[in-house]
Amino acid sequence: ETGVTQTPRHLVMGMTNKKSLKCEQHLGHNAMYWYKQSAKKPLELMFVYSLEERVENNSVPSRFSPECPNSSHLFLHLHTLQPEDSALYLCASSQGALLGNSPLHFGNGTRLTVT
Amino acid sequence: GENVEQHPSTLSVQEGDSAVIKCTYSDSASNYFPWYKQELGKGPQLIIDIRSNVGEKKDQRIAVTLNKTAKHFSLHITETQPEDSAVYFCAAPREGNQGGKLIFGQGTELSVKP
């Protein structure tokens, strides 16, 4: 149990589908993140939310749309994805996001396959 | 912005041997350096971190050393065991911690052979 729960664990979707990834943290943290992990690449930061406000959008295409309704929940809404978007999507939380010196707590990710 | 280089990309050791993974960073203002372990099918988990006011930190078989002058830090695992097999990532804050987020190295796949 990591304290950060992601659902679903696996998702296969067609390019015309709309789906959402969900993340919930039980650690009382005030910042949440989406990272993309592709084979042979470093983890890529996608979005950061601090106190439910988006503080970073790291040049992510608009087909990815994040939502943070409260400090414990984070969603990533997906539509008209491309096959190259297939990857492991990791959610993380931390206490404090404006300084990059807080440990990140990751969920186990959603393995996304776009067909 | 910060650039984090991690070496080697793969490392194979015999059980009981030591393993060392090195990372270099570019932003001299960075002051927080974590290491994460990612097992198959799981997300990365923090195993140890160090702040720039110390040069070394140890936790049982795991240690991290920091050389701020040379801008590199290393993970040392002693008496390796098969369960140490995983991918290890180093990280450093981007832009010297100001509005900074963690930038990750490329990862090292460690294999400990029994």
Image (cartoon, coloured by chain):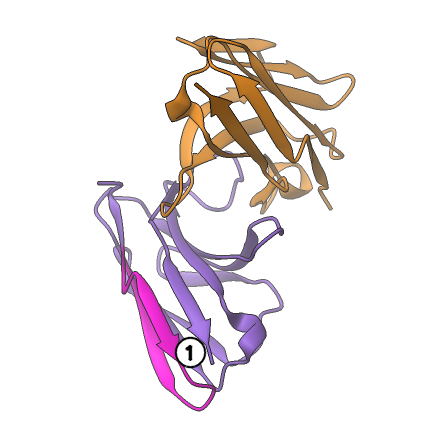
Check the image and name the residue furthest to the front: B114
Task: Give how far across and how far down residue A28 sits, in percent.
Answer: 24, 44
Q: Residue at x 53, y 29 (%)?
A: B110
Quarter the N terminus of chain A occupies: top left
Spot the purple chain and give its letter. A
User: In the rendered image of this protein, does residue B108 appear above or below residue A23?
Assistant: above
The magenta stretch is A6-23
Q: Quadrant of residue A105?
A: top left
A14 magenta-colored: yes
> From where the camera sits, is residue B32 visible?
yes
Please tell me the colour of chain B: orange
Q: Relative to A107, is B19 on the left or the right?
A: right
Please provide percent x and percent y for residue A67. Answer: 36, 70
Q: Quadrant of residue B27?
A: top right
To which quarter of the image does residue A19 belong? bottom left
Residue B91 belongs to magenta span: no
Q: Is residue B54 above or below residue B107?
A: above
